[in-house]
Amino acid sequence: MDTAFVPDDYFKRHSVLDIFGSDSPYNSYEIDLGCGDGGFLLQMAAHYPERAFLGIERLLGRIRRVCNESSQQGLNNVRGLRIESRYFLEYFIAPGSISRLHYLFPDPWPKEKHHKNRLVQEDFIPVLHRALSEKGELLFKTDHEDYYIWCCERLDASPLFQRVDWDEPFYPKTDFQLHWESMGKPIYQAKYIKIEA
């Protein structure tokens, strides 16, 4: 089974049924934004076969690896899509499609002159809100305290999201998390739920 999703048209809106099939049986559609080598994504998909998981990554080699691994493991609930993260959320996916967005250990762009490259900005929050389904969730982890504060300040100030307890009974650690923890670095995490405007 080819788990890569290659759309005929990158310039139209796509529903989750376009990606997972019109007879999709899944009760949740989750996005791993910047899925890397797919370690987290594949473990989640194996643990939660009733949910659908889409890995978003701009590097072709990483998407190929995720798709190959998911096929070898027989994970029918996984797809991979090579696309830029902001474009995917703002223009590609149909509004209200995403049940949960996992945003794990993104590039924090630590230099002040590069802060404009950070995904989470004030104008990004309405984009995320529109892409999420009713009571959709954002789950965010980072080792970078400044970026954690940056993201939380913007989300906390928005009437579109509410912070809730991190109550995940199963949530695999990414390779980044394992690496930073082995060096003794703290990990910061936050979970937000969409509030209807």
Image: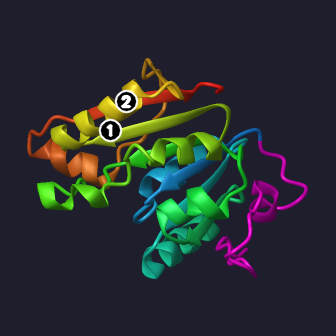
Residue 49 position within the rendered picture, expressed as x and y whole percent measured from the top left: 69, 45
> Which residue lies under the disc numbered 2?
190
Residue 14 position within the rendered picture, expressed as x and y whole percent measured from the top left: 75, 63
Left or right of residue 20: residue 183: left
Residue in the foreground of this view, choosing between 69 and 59:
59
In the rendering, which numbered label is found on residue 60? none
Question: Which residue range is magenta in the image?
Answer: 1-26
Magenta stretch holds residue 197: no
Q: Please, is residue 170 above or below residue 132 in the view? A: above
Within 10 Å of disc 2 (Cα), the crowding (few <14, some 14-19, many 20+) is some
Distance between mark 1 and mark 2 Cα atoms: 9 Å
Residue 57 position within the rendered picture, expressed as x and y whole percent measured from the top left: 47, 68
Q: Residue at x 50, y 37 (%)?
A: 138
Cβ atoms at labels 1 and 2 below 8 Å apart: yes
Q: Residue at x 45, y 73 (%)?
A: 58
> Which residue lies under the disc numbered 1?
151
Q: Amino acid at mark 2?
A: Ala
